[in-house]
Image (tube, coloured by chain):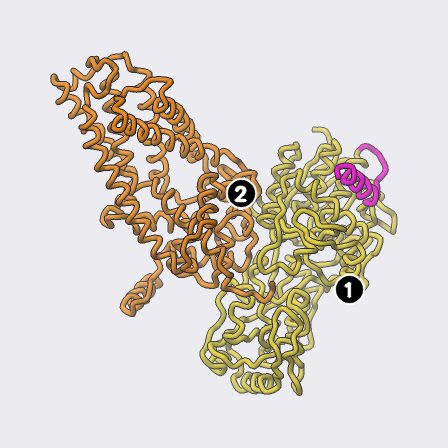
Amino acid sequence: MADVDVLVIGGGNAALCAALMAREAGASVLLLEAAPRAWRGGNSGHTRNLRCMHDAPQDVLVEAYPEEEYWQDLLKVTGGLTNEHLARLVIRASSHCRDWMRSHGVHFQPPLSGALHVARTNAFFMGGGKALVNAYYRSAEKLGVEVRYEAPVDRIEIDNGRFIAAHCNGERITAKTCVLAAGGFESNREWLREAWGQNERGEWPSDNFLIRGTAYNKGVLLKHLLDDHGADRIGDPTQAHMVAIDARAPLYDGGICTRIDCVSLGVVVNREAERFYDEGEDFWPKRYAIWGRLVAQQPGQIGYSIIDSKAIGRFMPPVFPGVKADSLPELAQKLGLPVETFMRTLDAYNAACRVGRFDHTALDDCHTEGVSPAKTHWARPIDTGPFYGYALKPGVTFTYLGLHTDDTAAVRFGNQPSSNLFVAGEMMAGNVLGKGYTAGVGMSIGTAFGRIAGVNAALASKQAPAQSLQTLVATEMKAQHANA
Amino acid sequence: MQTLEALTRDAQALANGEIVLSAPETEVARQMQICNACRYCEGFCAVFPAMTRRLEFGKADIHFLANLCHNCGACLHACQYAPPHEFAVNVPQAMAQVRGQTYADYAWPPALGRLYQRQGLTLSLALAAGLALFLVLGAVLQGGGLDALWGANLGGNFYNLFPHNLLVGLFAPVFLFVVLALGLGVRRFWRDVTPATSGAPLSAPATAEATDAVLRLKYLDGGHGDGCHNEDDAYTLSRRRFHHLTFYGFLLCFAATSLATVYHYAFGWAAPYDLPSIPKLLGAVGGVLLMLGTAGLWHLNRTRHALHGDAAQKPMDLGFIALLFLVSSSGLALWLARGTPALALLLCLHLGAVMALFATLPYGKFAHGIFRTAALLRHAVEKRQPNPIGLGAD
């Protein structure tokens, strides 16, 4: 059998984008997905939208979301841990990629109920990320991409920065070029343990983390590239997108529905029944990403969101019913919290509430005075039974540690780009998103870099030099203007 | 033990006058709780937007949503929580199971609701009885026993065997009973789901929207127009198209019969009508469409993805499809075999099949059209009312 032109390792959005682009450029493509077919697609199956730059209303997107505003949003959430050149290319690519996505069967729709705050910035996939993944696989198979499931790659051969072969289920697979898009390491418990270490209480915090996405992102290749091949790295292994989710969520693949959206409507206490952070600091969609870390720092890595009946119907319904009680002491008891401290905390909070005009859709003037930590918005006494409690645990969405890359998506060794090894998706997202998160940006990065990695792998298989993502963006921009 | 506990709980609830959910209803309520926290499928159909207007799912909500579901499969293939995920979400299947239960529960008279549980048997017996009725009747009327039916000289006119008034006397009461039974059944359904769907009365725009959804089978378009699912995660318009052929074929055949009745009584023009008369034209075209439609639906049903819908209802679906195919094909055969000795026997076959079809309409797959239309009407009414849930996140 002749060598395949492009070997794609991974089976999520970035891998599929790479495979499709390479195939469209005329290369023969083999895609190796570690998971069985039923679990294919990695974390992409849990996504729901793409953050898109647009200068004017575009089909499902309202108003405008210009490059500069997108960049400022990214700068803010990453606290500067980003690469402006790459970030701006991702942003520009996001405004022109949707026609291509549609041509491979992806459907977009207006925002979902409960997600109208991103109506302007994010294009939603109809049916969510799994529908997108299904569409890409169908298209890939139709175009003649060979797909293998349950095909985890444990190591690759690299000679002087050039990809030679991959080892998968005991088979040595050679190819002219290779795209690595096999995800982060969030489902590798040992690695998380190593990265997070032991805290001052003697706990291993990561043992209590839940993984919101796939169980197949073990980071085997990432570790192999960093440790065994000395590939250039980016990002901090303890950085992960982490949110507070329902403690009863499954260990893996709990996805979107395990989120708890009532934090800003009540108070959150730890295992000792003490509050530990301002629950009303900002709108929940802007704050949910910090609460994973906040809970991770608490004893036992657990928190309890406490609300009363006034909050019911004001937040996205949670997947599991809350613990319900007619009185606060009864609720504390049912949640297994020390009743006395719990009542002291709640009484102090209730007494500190200065209720003005409650408005959950604005940063209202309901706040606390004389209690620490303060609650700066939406502070209303928790006094109307029945009362509800939801236990919270940190839920890891993805990790940020990755391979350093440039605008050609090349893997780099000693700051030199490989001529035939490329990287996309979570394995390199840390170049653009060093920490923090904003909805839909992971898919923007995965799509932009997946596509350019595919283009360049196809070019490299013909010994042609790699293109910059800039060239792809410019070509598509021109095509879009020509059509308009 | 768990079953015993559940039984005790149910018995207590019953004693307290609370509404107890059946196992399929409980399963829908469980799944809707998960879906309502996710909502990725909101763009596919009417079920999910209706779901987001609720925080809890009572019996009437579940019956409403189950009949609103078209079993298109889109939400199953797109679901991150579908089996093998431990949440095991399969909305089309859970809804189908409740739907089957509602058909039986709302059947009138209630005792006949049991016929839904043994659809294969019901339809076979109905067909056998219909055939026997017309064969015996034909033999008696023709004289000389069953043998005499082969080659009986009817001169191409059916009424020479079965006089018009006899046919009217047989079919009219059955038809009126069908209308009454379906009407009473859906009326009870309507009364139960109306309070759960805002209680507001039907308006003209709501009626127009629901009618459009029924006539175009809007909710088999996938929300994007590429269609729904059959054997896998690919979209197909074939289910929608074959259903259209079946539905409109049936309507044309029905129109042919109705027009013929008008011809007979209003103008005194007696059958048989031949081309290019309007009843013949409607009947011929309708018959061909119905044959094509049912053949296609049969094939699609046999190749459906294993996780779609409720496997226990396959005999009901396939039995109804087969009966419709038999009615249309025997009707067309009748026309083609006018001058042949087979005519009398074919006539008995056709009339027997038509009788079986009509007699079982209120106790078989046909009910789906009635109950789904009612659910679509309630949905069109409800969506025009202000949303009772005011999510802060919006």
Identify the chain of the residue marked 1, using the numbered disc in the image: A
Q: Is residue A375 above or below residue B98?
A: below
Task: Tell me the colour chain A is drawn in.
Answer: yellow
Q: Is residue B169 above or below residue A310?
A: above
Within 10 angstroms of label 1, few (less than 14), some, or many (20 or more) residues? some
- Residue behind mark 1: A76
Could you tell me residue A234's position as x and y percent?
80, 57
Query: Label 2 sits on what residue type?
Result: Gly
Helix, strand, or loop for circle 2?
Answer: loop
> Which of the numbered marks, if any, corresponds to residue A325?
none
Could you tell me residue A1's position as x and y percent?
69, 28
Point out the stretch of residues depicted in magenta: A462-484
Q: At x 31% / y 29%, what residue is drawn?
A: B257
Q: Is residue B171 above or below residue B53?
A: above
Within 10 angstroms of label 2, few (less than 14), some, or many (20 or more) residues? many
Task: Tell me the colour chain B is drawn in.
Answer: orange
**Discs 2, 1 touching: Cβ within 8 Å:** no
> Which of the numbered marks, if any, corresponds to residue B222?
2
Q: Are marks 2 and 1 on the same chain?
A: no
Magenta includes A54?
A: no
| Residue closer to the observer: B108 or A126 | B108
Which part of the image, by quadrant, shows the C terminus of chain A? Answer: top right
Identify the chain of the residue marked 2, using the numbered disc in the image: B
Question: In the image, A325: left or right of B359?
Answer: right
| Residue closer to the observer: B381 or A124 | B381
Q: At x 49% / y 83%, what residue is drawn?
A: A329
Camera-side mark, 2 or 1: 2
Magenta includes A469?
A: yes
